[in-house]
Amino acid sequence: MDQRRKILDLLLSNARESTTDIARQTGLDEATVEETITELEDDGVVRGYQAVVDWQQLADDDEHVQAEVELNVELDRETGYEDIARRIVKFPQVSSLRLFSGDYDFAILVEGESMHDVSQFISEQIAPIPEVTQTVTHFVMETYKDRGIVFGDRDDDDRLSISP
């Protein structure tokens, strides 16, 4: 495995890992690690760093709703998938957008403060796009794992207690 991949694997498991710790784990010197990370960022391989949030653990009254939206589109001579994608990614409510093969063309992850917000966004911003022929919205009810992080694993001792 090349050094770029080793560093990427460590950043994927913990983006807050220090260059000192990455150097220790990879056997590289710290300057090489820093230079490699800068190259990965400059080359557009590393596009950013984000926290993985378990919204249900946030103790406040603000609701956070996510929905996966399947989108079918009909292309014409002047409009391609890239054109439609460029239009959709501009909305701040869209946290991810992917082109798929199969039963639908795009999968969009939409986030909002309520189911009403998300539904309104889909019906007023996405569905009216001329090339969009169908939307199917699936609200996320529970997240068990996100970006490799298992939620709900609180190190609880799930062994049965034995009482005399």
Image: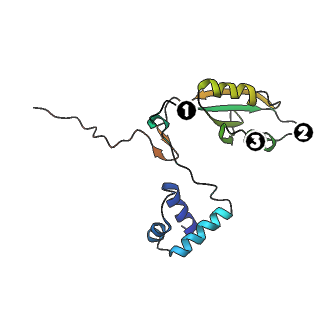
Q: Position of residue 11 (x, y in %)?
A: 52, 59
Which mark is drawn over residue 85? 3
- Quarter in which the C terminus is drawn: top left
The crowd level at tag 3 (other Cα within 10 Å; few <14, some 14-19, many 20+) is some
Q: Amino acid at mark 3?
A: Ala
In front: label 3 or label 2: 3
| Residue 2 visible in image | no
- Quarter in which the N terminus is drawn: bottom right
The residue that label 1 is drawn on is 64
Direction from residue 87 to residue 62 in the image, left or right:
left
Q: Position of residue 127 (x, y in %)?
A: 75, 27
Q: Secondary structure at mark 3?
A: helix
| Disc 3/disc 2 C-alpha distance (Å) | 16 Å
Looking at the image, which is closer to me, 63 or 40? 63
Direction from residue 81 to residue 77 in the image, left or right:
right
Instruction: Please report whichever mark, 2 or 1, sits nearer to the chain's N-terminal start.
Output: 1
Q: Secondary structure at mark 1?
A: loop
**The quarter of the displayed image where residue 161 is located:** top left
| Disc 3/disc 1 C-alpha distance (Å) | 24 Å
Whether residues under marks 3 and 1 lie with C-beta atoms below 8 angstroms apart, the answer is no
In front: label 2 or label 1: 1
Q: Amino acid at mark 2?
A: Arg
In front: label 3 or label 1: 1
Direction from residue 71 to residue 19 in the image, left or right:
left
| Residue 30 visible in image | yes
Q: Amino acid at mark 1?
A: His
Judged from this view, the residue extending furthest toward the left is 164
Which mark is drawn over residue 77? 2
Q: Position of residue 40 (x, y in %)?
A: 63, 64
